[in-house]
Amino acid sequence: MVVERTRKQKIIRRTVWGVSLAALLSAALVWAGFSESGMPVAVLAGAFGLAGLLELGFMGKLADEGLLGAFVAAGILTLLVSLAAVDGLLPSAMLGPLREQFTPKVLGFLIMVPALVAMASRPRHGRLGLLGRAGVAALLALWVGYPFAVLHSVWALMGHTAFVVLLVLSKIGDIAGYYVGNAIGKSHPFKGISPGKTTAGCVGSLVVALIAGVLAAQLGWLGDERWAWASGLLFGLVINLAAQAGDLFESVVKRKSEVKDSGTWFGPSGGVLDLVDSLLFTVPAALLTWPLFFLAA
């Protein structure tokens, strides 16, 4: 009985935090909708990328490997590349000239450069060699930094309304999976990675995302469909699979780092990476696949 009460309290707390964060995000998106340049998107994306990479630097065994310096450098580059996507936001002496030659999508790969910092650092209790630390730093920096570095490019490509739908599709499956899993979930297909994830939750997440994708496409929120209702269905499928993969990948990183949550910024919802884990795969997925299903905004 006590366990059931504690479980309900946890669900209520997460719901309250989730609604509060959703309200803040909605306010930010409304603000972005009134901006022709998309400056709020670039600023918030850069800030989240920097915060997420800083969080990685302090996570359990990753901290022991002495990767904080690499992640700080990657976070600063993420912020700069994101801001460089907006005309006039950065002084011309910074990334402005580079942006004239390369798109932010290409500049985003600069985020792997700080892996060199990892090679030069000395771990406190780490076991990885120089090349191992550099490889881990490059992979994780790209995983967290690249989606936020190119987020403004995705906003510009899709248009504001479709961009909002992308964010909703990225999280709605996660939300549906959480409640469906808690309600009827029995089997746990990923016990070694994410013990709390259930088969029912994964299926519920997918079904809700497919319905939401078709509905958004039919309402014209995702742009002009190339393949009628199938465009919305396929886009919902791609984004949901990417979102669930992002959630699982973050679970792998946390398990390897021997931490339960990536941080404590958002109470029972965890840290920055716990909040944005699905976006880390859905943003690149949308960048690649949205033009296949819809006409450019």
Image: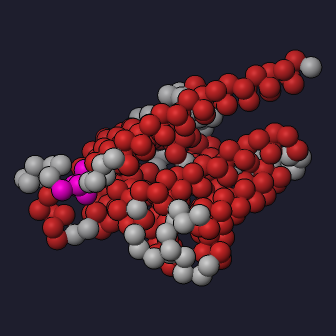
Across and down, in percent, residue 194 comes to 71, 46
Farthest residue in the top direction? 2
Q: Nearer the viewer, residue 282 or 158?
A: 158
Q: How many marks?
A: 0
Which residue is most to the right?
1
Question: Magenta stretch containing residue 85, yes or no?
Answer: yes
Can you give x and y, in whole percent of width and height, for residue 73 in the image? 28, 45
Which residue is depicted at the point 65% across and 75% down?
229
**Up-down relation of residue 101 to residue 3 (above or below):** below
Q: Position of residue 283 (x, y in %)?
A: 48, 59
Q: Residue at x 53, y 62 (%)?
A: 221
Query: Relative to 135, is 157 above or below?
Result: below
Residue 22 occupies quadrant? top right
Q: Which residues are magenta?
A: 83-87
Q: Is residue 169 visible?
A: yes
Closer to the camera, 235 or 223?
223
Q: Is residue 281 visible?
A: no
Q: Quadrant of the C terminus?
A: bottom left
| Residue 253, x across and y down, in percent | 56, 47
- Check the picture and name the quadrant holding the N terminus: top right
Which of 150 and 37 lies nearest the eye of the viewer? 37
Q: Using the rendered view, name the quadrant where residue 175 is placed.
A: top right
In magenta segment, residue 99: no
Residue located farthest toward the front when viewing the structure as drawn: 219
Q: Seen in the image, is 164 located left or right of residue 213?
A: left
Q: Please tell me whether the stretch drawn in magenta is mainly helix, strand or loop.
A: loop
Residue found 19% across the figure and 63% down from its top: 99
